[in-house]
């Protein structure tokens, strides 16, 4: 396959996976975005420039995750490789459970779709399959691709995804700590088996969460209860779980965002902010201690790609 463009721009959202009981399946796209500019070069040179989150930390060569994903997508459709100039303006925090790696992977594959002459060869189904192969699970990649809330699952021959309704009153608030936590560390403390009663509890709450997200936000506190992963992770993110406990005791549907350590409050919109604002302020007592409160909307569109005219 030949290339059909030499310059694209990509906008990709942050995501929060699990949302409490939807472990490795449910995800939500958030209105916080990384923006990328990808230009093909006439040489084999790789130029990577990063501003914002990850600047000075992420690789600036072929090891950059966006470059790896773009290369994998071009190889998948048999398109030629080329030198690249990649400029990233990152707003999604790294290592905080807000889907920064999924955003990079989806952005790289989407950039490849914008560059090739036959973008339909990188359909949404193919993009999700490639992203899941790189990520290991689809819970962040699916909402990064499709926007809104999604449930994703393995089909045996690929990855399935369904978009879920999101109530217009939903107003997510991310509470982001200064420290990072790797996904491998968060997964490493999970048990290999769980009690049958906990599995049954989890199935019921995950089903309820679909209803709460779309039509009954008044049920979000009950619907986000979890027995499968959060308490097991208390040892590696004690402050995050203490905050979750405090907010839930105050009636806020708070969860660990993805693998953490960010806490996500699934709040409801009010005239002056959200119904979680007072509880969040009370939990900190006037001293944030390195935490940031980031009110967010829901990104309804997912990754966006546009070709840039040359000349």
Image: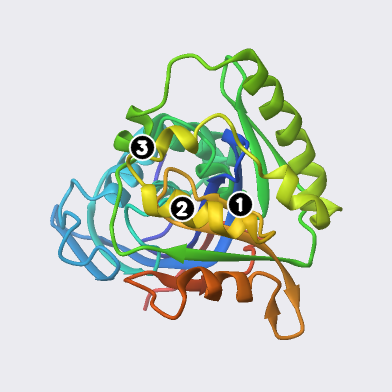
Regarding residue 144, the answer to whether it shows in the image is no
Task: Give the mark, 1 or 3, whose residue is nearer the N terminus.
Answer: 1
**Residue placed under numbered mark 3 in the picture:** 186
When the figure is inspected, residue 141 is found, relative to residue 192, above or below; the finding is: below
Q: CA distance from mark 1 to mark 3?
A: 20 Å
**Residue placed under numbered mark 1 in the picture:** 28
Q: CA distance from mark 2 to mark 1?
A: 23 Å
Image location (x, y in percent) of residue 34: 42, 65
Q: In the picture, which quadrant includes the C terminus?
A: bottom left
At mark 1, the secondary structure is strand
Q: Nearer the viewer, mark 2 or mark 3?
A: 2
Marks 1/3 in contact by CB < 8 Å: the verdict is no
Classed neighbour count for the residue bearing mark 2: other residues with Cα under 10 Å, few (<14), some (14–19), many (≥20): few
Regarding residue 309, the answer to whether it shows in the image is yes
**How was the colour assigned to the protein in this rendering?**
rainbow
Q: Is residue 5 left or right of residue 44?
A: right
When the figure is inspected, residue 168 is found, relative to residue 99, above or below; the finding is: below
Q: CA distance from mark 2 to mark 3?
A: 16 Å
**Residue placed under numbered mark 2 in the picture:** 242
Task: Give the mark, 2 or 1, whose residue is nearer the N terminus.
Answer: 1
Image location (x, y in percent) of residue 179: 28, 58
Classed neighbour count for the residue bearing mark 3: other residues with Cα under 10 Å, few (<14), some (14–19), many (≥20): many
Q: Nearer the viewer, residue 139 or 60?
A: 139
Image location (x, y in percent) of residue 185: 30, 36
């Amino acid at each position: 396959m030949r290339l059909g463009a030499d310059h694209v721009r990509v906008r990709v959202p942050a995501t929060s996976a699990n949302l409490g009981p939807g472990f490795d399946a449910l995800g939500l796209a958030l209105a916080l975005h990384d923006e990328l500019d990808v230009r093909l070069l006439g040489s084999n040179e790789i130029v990577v420039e990063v501003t914002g989150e990850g600047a000075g930390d992420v690789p600036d060569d072929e090891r950059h995750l966006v470059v790896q994903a773009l290369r994998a997508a071009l190889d998948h459709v048999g398109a030629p490789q080329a030198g690249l100039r990649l400029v990233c303006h990152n707003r999604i925090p790294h290592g905080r459970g807000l889907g920064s790696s999924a955003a990079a992977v989806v952005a790289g594959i989407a950039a490849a779709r914008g560059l090739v002459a036959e973008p339909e060869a990188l359909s949404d189904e193919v993009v999700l399959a490639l992203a899941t192969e790189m990520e290991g699970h689809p819970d962040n990649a699916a909402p990064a691709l499709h926007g809104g809330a999604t449930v994703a699952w393995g089909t045996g021959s690929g990855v399935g995804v369904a978009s879920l309704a999101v109530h217009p009153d939903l107003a997510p608030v991310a509470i982001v700590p200064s420290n990072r936590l790797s996904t491998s560390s968060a997964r490493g403390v999970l048990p290999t088996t769980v009690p049958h009663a906990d599995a049954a509890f989890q199935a019921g709450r995950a089903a309820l969460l679909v209803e709460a997200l779309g039509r009954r936000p008044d049920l979000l506190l009950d619907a986000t209860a979890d027995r499968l992963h959060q308490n097991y992770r208390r040892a590696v993110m004690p402050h995050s779980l203490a905050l979750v406990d405090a907010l839930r005791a105050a009636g806020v549907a708070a969860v660990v965002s993805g693998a953490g350590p960010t806490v996500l409050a699934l709040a409801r919109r009010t005239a002056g902010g959200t119904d979680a604002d007072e509880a969040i302020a009370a939990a900190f007592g006037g001293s944030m201690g390195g935490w940031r409160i980031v009110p967010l909307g829901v990104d309804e569109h997912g990754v966006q790609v546009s070709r840039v005219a040359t000349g």
